[in-house]
Amino acid sequence: MDEIVEDLLGTNNKSKNNSYNKKQNNKNNWKEQSKKRNEAYRKIDSMSFKISKDGKMFMQYLNVLSRFEKYSVGNCMLILEAEPNAMQIKEKKDWIDRGYEVTQNEKSMIILEPNRVNGVLYYNPKEEYDISRTNAPIPEERKYTDKEILLALFNDCRAKREVVDVLPNGDKGAEYVESENKLYMCRGLKADYLLKTVIQEIARMEMQGVENGEMKEFKTYCVSYMICKKYGLETSQFDFTNLPKELAYKEKGKGIRIELEDIRTNFTTVNSKIMSYFEQEEKTKKNKEKER
């Protein structure tokens, strides 16, 4: 009781010391967070230049983005730098809440979590662990049939579609003619080749906000690669050895990331339509099973 009275009157030295210690801890925590944030920014800038000049590393970046399409360009770079083969990342607490444990002494990776306070956007460093660093079972990748992928590609497709024996121009398996807003596709082709050409033309069709030219073709190529990679199609024919000069010769990391953001945005646009189809099919399947 005496301690409470002294605390109310401001004469409790113990209370004062606790308040001081709390302020010190908050100050130290802020410094630590600032240090981690600045280190993350440094890594992002460094990775920007590495990716833009090394075709193999650029492909690895696209692999990460194909698995983490909801993450920012910068965070995909942080994942690539720390854990290039990461499949699923969460905070330690989230893994524990799901009944799993992070393996002892495993090193975490830092990503930046956006947080808006009073209209101002901040990025807070956040420690995450890949599923490979836990005792959680690695989920099996779903296998898709050629028919399923083709139907998913046509989901919410804004162009008219027509099957022909000969394409209007060129000798590809599929061709999008912008003036007609029509996607032409050849019959009688091998499924694997047909799928890849359809993917490339749909990626070109959905390539928004990018002027025609070398960079548009390159960005279309990148989106096509990621869609093929994500849905289990053969990707050995893709080659990123010679990256565009417009990307490789950028003087600032931010300029590189702006170009990469176009790729991420357009990949997300195409992939979201594909995923929407599969999600709807899954719901329909479950509803039919309930009706039995």
Image (cartoon, rainbow, N blue to C red):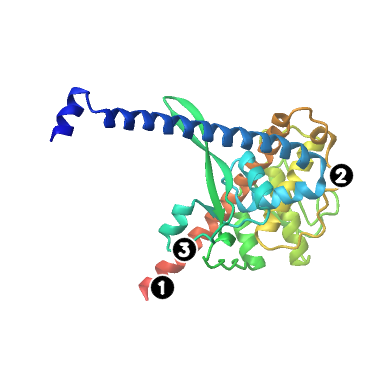
Tag 1: amino acid: Glu
Q: CA distance from mark 2 to mark 1?
A: 51 Å
Label 3 neighbourhood size at 10 Å, few (<14), some (14-19), many (20+)? Answer: some
Q: Residue at x 57, y 66 (%)?
A: 138
Q: Is residue 156 visible?
A: no
Question: Mark 2–mark 3 contact, CB under 8 Å?
Answer: no
Q: Which residue is mark 3?
A: 100
Q: Quadrant location of residue 229? A: bottom right
Q: Which residue is mark 2?
A: 242
Q: Which residue is mark 1?
A: 289
Q: Position of residue 259 (x, y in %)?
A: 71, 35
Question: Mark 3–mark 1 contact, CB under 8 Å?
Answer: no
Is 194 located above or below residue 26 in the figure? Answer: below
Q: Between 259 and 282, which is closer to the camera in this rendering?
A: 259
Question: Which residue is situated farthest in the left direction here?
Answer: 1
Q: Nearer the viewer, mark 3 or mark 1?
A: 3
Label 2 neighbourhood size at 10 Å, few (<14), some (14-19), many (20+)? Answer: few
Q: Quadrant of the N terminus?
A: top left
Give the mark nearest the N terminus, 2 or 3.
Answer: 3
Is 90 located above or below residue 37 in the figure? Answer: below
- Local secondary structure at mark 3: loop
Q: Position of residue 39 (x, y in %)?
A: 63, 36
Q: Residue at x 50, y 28 (%)?
A: 121
Q: How many marks?
A: 3
- Local secondary structure at mark 2: loop
Q: Is residue 116 visible?
A: yes
Tag 2: amino acid: Asn
Tag 3: amino acid: Tyr
Q: Residue at x 71, y 48 (%)?
A: 61
